[in-house]
Image (spheres, rainbow, N blue to C red):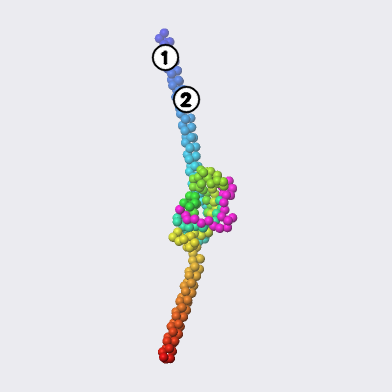
């Protein structure tokens, strides 16, 4: 009886040991799978988050860079640009080239979408840029019907025709490059010279009238 009891105890211990080992294996196996699942979910979440961040940023590229740049566009400058606007699928929705006149606005004053205020900074006269503007920097969730749908990403080709100082009026802006400024100064100098000639002619006429009046007065005195 004692031997049988010892055998039963040993069998039970062995059974308990294997049962514990089995439970531990299952637990570790489950934990491994759980950890792997969590890691995969974390990687997907990080990748998705980075994708959203990239989509929400303004993307720029230079299509044409001029050899010389006198000055670059800054906030407050009045710019004159030609542009072509397309949706993400390539559908065109606007073009200043078709109208024949460049579009003008003051940079950084909220007169255009944020993507333009940011994307035109630092441009040189004659430079051409490509802008990819997310909806958050464009027309947002509401879009601009009927041509621009809600949440649309916009693609622009923008050519900087010229820009001027913010302190001047739109029509009298100092243009860059400054080659045209010399012609304006010459014209102004010419106008000043013409005004001087007119003043001299006027002075001579007044002197002539005074001489004639003086001669008439002397003749009158002699007759008396």
Which residue does the image show at 48% across and 52% down from the upper left? Answer: 111
Q: CA distance from mark 1 to mark 2?
A: 25 Å
Residue reaching furthest to the top:
1
How many marks do you count on the picture? Answer: 2
To which quarter of the image does residue 75 belong? bottom left
In reply to whether residue 96 is colored magenta, the answer given is yes
Q: Residue 9 — which label?
A: 1
Q: Label 1's element? A: helix
Which-is-in-front pick, marks 1 and 2?
2
- Near mark 2 (Cα within 10 A), the count class, few <14, some 14-19 or many ≥20, is few
Residue 29 image offset from top left, x and y in percent:
47, 27
Q: Is residue 24 above or below residue 96?
A: above
Q: Is residue 154 above or below residue 214?
A: above
In reply to whether residue 57 is colored magenta, the answer given is no
Residue 81 image offset from top left, x and y in percent:
53, 56
Of mark 1 and mark 2, the one earlier in the sequence is: 1
Residue 48 image offset from top left, x and y in percent:
50, 39
Residue bearing the label numbered 2: 26
Image quarter where the C terminus lies is bottom left
- Near mark 1 (Cα within 10 A), the count class, few <14, some 14-19 or many ≥20, is few
Which residue does the image show at 43% across and 88% down from the upper left? Answer: 220
Q: Is residue 52 above or below residue 200?
A: above
Start and end of the magenta stretch? 86-109
Image quarter where the N terminus lies is top left
Judge left or right: residue 87 versus residue 117: right
Front residue (pair 137, 126): 137
Q: Residue 24 — which label?
A: none
Q: Is residue 132 visible?
A: yes
Which residue does the image show at 54% across and 56% down from the upper left? Answer: 82
Q: Is residue 64 visible?
A: no
Front residue (pair 199, 66): 199
Q: Is residue 204 above or below residue 180?
A: below
């Amino acid at each position: 009886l004692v031997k049988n009891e010892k055998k039963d105890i040993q069998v039970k211990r062995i059974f308990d040991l294997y049962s514990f080992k089995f439970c531990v294996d299952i637990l570790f196996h489950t934990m491994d799978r759980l950890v792997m699942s969590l890691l995969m979910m974390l990687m997907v979440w990080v990748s998705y988050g980075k994708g959203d961040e990239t989509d929400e940023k303004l993307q720029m590229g230079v299509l044409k860079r001029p050899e010389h740049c006198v000055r670059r566009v800054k906030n407050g400058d009045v710019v004159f640009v030609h542009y072509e606007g397309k949706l993400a699928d390539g559908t065109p929705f606007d073009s200043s080239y078709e109208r024949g006149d460049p579009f003008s606005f003051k940079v950084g004053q909220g007169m255009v979408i944020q993507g333009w205020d940011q994307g035109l900074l630092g441009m040189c006269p004659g430079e051409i840029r490509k802008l990819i503007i997310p909806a958050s920097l464009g027309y947002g969730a509401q879009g601009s019907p009927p041509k621009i749908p809600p949440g649309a990403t916009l693609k622009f080709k923008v050519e900087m025709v010229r820009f001027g100082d913010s302190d001047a009026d739109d029509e009298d802006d100092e243009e860059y490059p400054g080659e045209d400024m010399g012609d304006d100064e010459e014209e102004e100098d010419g106008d000043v010279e013409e005004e001087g000639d007119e003043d001299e002619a006027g002075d001579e006429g007044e002197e002539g009238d005074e001489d004639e009046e003086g001669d008439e007065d002397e003749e009158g005195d002699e007759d008396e």
